Image (cartoon, grey):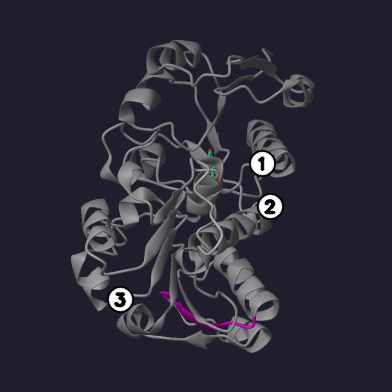
Amino acid sequence: MDKSKVFIAKNAGQEVVKYISKYCDCGMWDKNSGIPRKKLLEAIQNADGLIIPGDIKVDEELLSKAPKLKVVCNTAVGYDNFDLKAMKERNVVGTNTPNILNDSVADLVFTLILSTARRAVELDRYVRNNKWHVGDEKNLFGIDVHHRTIGIIGLGRIGEAIAKRAKFGFDMEVLYYNRHRKIEAEEKLGIKYAGFETLIKKSDFIVLMTPFTKETYRLVDYREFEMMKDTAIFINASRGQTVNEHALIGALKNGQILGAGLDVYEHEPIKKDNPLLELNNVVLLPHIGSATEKTRSDMIMMAAENAIKVLNGEEAPNVVPELKL
Ligand code: 8YV
């Protein structure tokens, strides 16, 4: 019998190719630039398995070009790039990479919180531009993070890792909002469930950590920014579509909130004329929540193991809930 074929649509390194090649034929896009859609669609014509970064859309077009496809493995925990209905109709399994990135993403969220509150990026520019003078003291003030209130919207496993840092590392009061209350996490971490509006109104740091679904599209919009404290800092490390970026830009410009720390945007990479690029009270990162060498290499291996399990006819550990049989 012919070996199954797996295509890896990103330059994931030779270790993963070696692992997959023990079981299947393995092809890989080995350039460091993203694979053009046309090339991808050509490369998957005979593929049984596909491993992709989280920004490749798995839709009707892609699925129709790969009639043998049995499994698509995201190297991301989010899977808003999956057209779940189309995948289900064609019996294509989809997997993601939960848990192994929790701590790396939580660390990144704290990078955004601290650098925004203490104006680290803005003041780095100030030092480099030789603007630092004796007597400047008050111009350099930021705001405290410790002992203040953080509100986490979306208490999944990453949300819990953020809550842990906030509570035990920074003595913060931690509020959370989630579809379901999590009593065990409340007891373990000493955190409090709050209604959505209460969290928005009371928090000094508002962290958006919910997956992007139909229900969370622009969850934070004009109304929410109006309700925030004018000293609040807004952090988004989920998906750009969970916030109305126009509303956010307005709130940053007119002093409705103090600042924002962003890892995600409505359009990625960010467009050159995005007004966020002109603002001093934001810290902007290029979607690097999980981007440490160790975490990304664990994620790619996890995706590869999922692919091999499915192609060997076994149960894969990380099938996304909507596609479980
Ligand atoms: C991914 C992410 O690394 O896991 C997610 O959902 O957003 C990031 O960790 C990114 O999508 C690259 O594939």
- Report whether 102 appears left or right of 277: right
Question: How busy is the neighbourhood of tag 1: few (under 14 within 10 Å), some, or many (20 plus)?
Answer: many
Marks 1/3: CA distance? 36 Å
Q: Is mark 3 within 8 Å of ligand 1?
A: no
Q: Is residue 272 above or below residue 157?
A: above
Q: Given this view, does label 1 or label 3 mark the residue nearer the observer?
A: 3
State the image coordinates of residue 37 (x, y, percent, origin top left).
39, 18
Is residue 138 toward the left or the right of residue 30 in the image? left
**Residue at 62% in and 22% down:** 11
Label 2, label 1: how many angstroms apart (C-alpha)?
Answer: 7 Å
Asked if the residue under mark 1 is in contact with the one under mark 2, i.e. CB atoms within 8 Å, the reply is: yes
Above or below 152: residue 128: above
Q: Which residues are magenta?
A: 171-179
Question: Which residue in the protein does label 2 denote?
Answer: 100
Q: Amino acid at mark 3?
A: Met
Q: Nearer the viewer, residue 301 or 251?
A: 251
In the rendering, at what x and y percent does residue 208 appear? Answer: 42, 64
In the depicted view, which residue is nearer to us: 77 or 43?
77
Residue corresponding to mark 1: 299
